[in-house]
Amino acid sequence: MAYDDLRGFIKALENAGELKKIQTEVDPILEITEITDRVSKSRSGKGGAPGGPALLFQNIKGHPGAQVLINQFGSESRMKLALEVDSLNDVADRIRHFMDVKSPQGFLDKVKMLPMLAEMGKFFPKTVSTGPCKEVIKRDNFSLLDFPILQCWPGDGGRFITLPCVVTRDPKTGKRNVGMYRIHVYDGRTTGMHWQRQKIAAEHVRDLMRASAAGGNPARTSAAVDIMARSLGGSILAEGSRPTGKMEVAVAIGTDPALTFSAIVPAPPEVEEYMIAGFMRQKPVELVKCETVDLEVPANAEIILEGYINLDELRMEGPFGDHTGFYTLADQYPVFHCTCITHRKNPIYATTIVGKPPMEDAFMGKAVERIFLPLMKLTIPEIVDVNLPIEGVFHNLMLVSIKKSYPGQARKVMNAIWSLGQAMFTKCIVVVDEDVDVQDIGDVTLKVLNHIDPERDIQFTMGPIDSLDHASRLPNYGSKMGIDGTRKWSSEGFTRPWPDEIVMDEKTKALVDRKWKELGL
């Protein structure tokens, strides 16, 4: 059965020996980060698995009675526990099963699809009248600083909410989006929203801005496009073209693990994360209406923040010690104004830290890689496997193996990946043949460095770059590199013989296998 809430997951972590409760007093300013960073980079449990345990701090300096949960996803075993699977491939197999359904050709085919349609129906979220997140409702006399929000690193611009599910609504379609964006706490009622310009929430803002700048007529948007391009994460709004109005926002903190994970998945904008979470947990997410904004939020969340952003308001957000291992520099982002806080009694504050890998986000990222490989193959069917090495912080390096069938196919795959949603940010793509194990970095290094002629096999292209990339020539725009590490064919202009790889014959290997014990090695 799916976890009803975060507390159910905490019990499961404790029962599995994956949770450490800490009663020693700790400071949310820097100290929790230093403790968690050491744990994240340690090994513990069966076989010395990396990631250490999940941590529940129960004595927080300046916040009597508060509890902080961190590192809940910080190992492969906890990711599997969070999604209630024996293997992350189990989720990928479920996705593959639904993708393999063919359009019904006749009445009998349609009848056969009814059970699957009924199963799909149980994933849709359902709205309930109330829930635990409404146990305490504060419209007045509240402060974000009442919660033990962390300052993670010495150079950070302040405290940051780092594991939020941020809910916005598409002004054109009405569909909800749940994304995970860091939130810079300025004071008790205002924060910065780190909506990078390529994120869906940023597009929601731009759509409202376009409509506002066009006098409320969405068809008259051309004059507003230039404003939008510079309005998020870049510079001030164009003079004389300032849009007006607000966009409602809600933030859920401390949700069940499937929903928290769903907020980071690279799903198409038309698919709501609430439904993805239902698919992951095989049970619908229960939602309640907010008190002061027209949005629905998880009924069982620990904490809900309600509020809005003004379309004409930007403020410096950051710096922030990021998952790249470097500080993201301060820049201008929208300002969130909190109008109401609701929460459970004695809420548990769920958070995470990012920095030099490996950390908790590394295991979340590897889960995304495994689970969404089938969707990648749907668009690029020649892909055999992919590996986003943790040290490449996911958007800096992707290793791809393919079934090569024609000349230039490796370059076709590179360009296809750069056209796939968030994969467009991949700085370096390395493509190898299907017999190379991309999960074996040593094998990839050996084969690629032996297979390439650098001038011939390395290509560069320009395009959008992750906002966190501090090395690109311009913010959000720069170059990317593709390396064709496949064997070269004569039809690709390679006329020399290609040598065979050194491999022992099977007969000799079997002979030595039989003698191995006798050899005493």
Image (cartoon, helix red, strand yellow):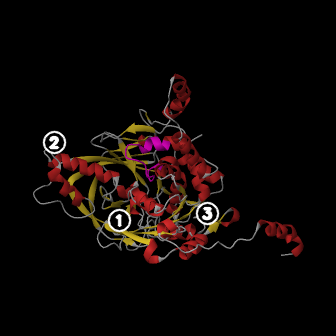
Which residue is pictured at 35% across the width and 65% down the height?
A: 465
Which residue is pictured at 60% across the width and 72% down the height?
A: 442
Q: Which residue is mark 2?
A: 217
Residue bounds of the magenta highlight: 262-277
**Residue 388, position as x, y percentages in the image:** 51, 63
Which corner quadrant holds the N terminus? top right
Q: Which residue is mark 3?
A: 435
Q: Secondary structure at mark 2?
A: loop
Q: Secondary structure at mark 3?
A: loop
Which amino acid lies under the numbered mark 1 shown in the image of this protein? Ile
* Viewer-side residue, 383 vs 241: 383
The residue furthest top is 107
Figure quadrant of residue 514? bottom right
Q: Which residue is mark 1?
A: 465
Q: Nearer the viewer, mark 3 or mark 1?
A: 3
* Viewer-side residue, 264 vs 413: 413
Figure quadrant of residue 270? top left
**Residue 116, position as x, y percentages in the image:** 54, 32
Q: CA distance from mark 3 to mark 1?
A: 31 Å
Which residue is pictured at 49% across the width and 61% down the height?
A: 361
Which corner quadrant holds the C terminus? bottom right
Q: CA distance from mark 3 to mark 2?
A: 56 Å
- In-image side of 418 versus 38 (left or right): left
Can residue 226 be seen by looking at this rendering?
yes
**Magenta portion: prevailing SS class:** loop
Which amino acid lies under the numbered mark 3 shown in the image of this protein? Asp
**Lower position in the chain sequence, tag 3 or tag 1:** 3
Which amino acid lies under the numbered mark 2 shown in the image of this protein? Asn
Q: Nearer the viewer, mark 2 or mark 1?
A: 1
